Image (spheres, rainbow, N blue to C red):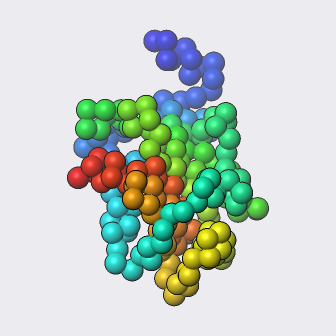
Amino acid sequence: MLNAIKNLFSGRTTVQKTLNGRICTYHYTGKPAFFDPVQMLTDFNFRYQDKQVQRLPYRFQSDPILGLVSLPADSENPAVTCRLNFNKKVLEVNRFVFKISSSPASHYRFYYDGEEILRFTRIYQMASYHQNLGLKLASVHKDNLDLSRSQWSWENEGGKVLFLENFGYPQLWDIRNINHIKNMIS
């Protein structure tokens, strides 16, 4: 009842959907965008394991994305929040909608058991952005980027991964620890 009153005053709508046998609760304003967070992680993991991915060392001293892409601020409200029980813990994903230059983009923040585990950004209608961003990231440490590929992964031994791919649109996965993701979906 309390959530219904909060939603009434905030203008947010709550909907439950069953996706792949899991009950997902979505809170949103405006037009909804329903997504399956577990399927997103599973699909990512499949593409990440591809032998065509160029693997590079993650040697960034600070977040390399901050200076290259203006992402929504932590204080901004997401357009959609999805919550579900997964492996006896709560998986929550916040989806933000914004623009990079004049192109629409979406940005997702994944929290598992209250801890942020990854950020994912998809940029629509900007195919050239993928290669340009890859070159900018590679230039920080003079990495030799293989431009014949469309998937690059900067990784360190602690599990930190920055995965850039062109999967129809440029997509950037900023993962705190890849081992947590693998354990979650295995």
Q: Is residue 81 left or right of residue 136?
A: left
Q: Residue at x 60, y 45 (%)?
A: 96
- Choose top left, top right, bottom left or bottom right for residue 182: bottom left
Count of numbered marks: 0
Looking at the image, is 10 positioned above or below residue 58? above
Position of residue 106 measured from the top left corner of the image (x, y, whole percent): 59, 53
Identity of the residue furthest to the top in this view: 1
- Choose top left, top right, bottom left or bottom right for residue 75: top right
Position of residue 143 measured from the top left corner of the image (x, y, whole percent): 57, 76
Q: Residue at x 29, y 47 (%)?
A: 184
The reply to whether residue 28 is in sight is yes
Position of residue 124 measured from the top left corner of the image (x, y, whole percent): 62, 64
Looking at the image, is 75 positioned above or below residue 145? above
Q: Residue at x 50, y 37 (%)?
A: 81
Between 55 and 79, the residue placed more toward the observer is 55
Q: Is residue 101 left or right of residue 119?
A: right
Looking at the image, is 27 positioned above or below residue 1? below
Position of residue 35 measured from the top left corner of the image (x, y, whole percent): 44, 49
- Choose top left, top right, bottom left or bottom right for residue 31: top right
Q: Is residue 91 left or right of residue 185?
A: right
The reply to whether residue 40 is in sight is no
Identity of the residue furthest to the right in this view: 101
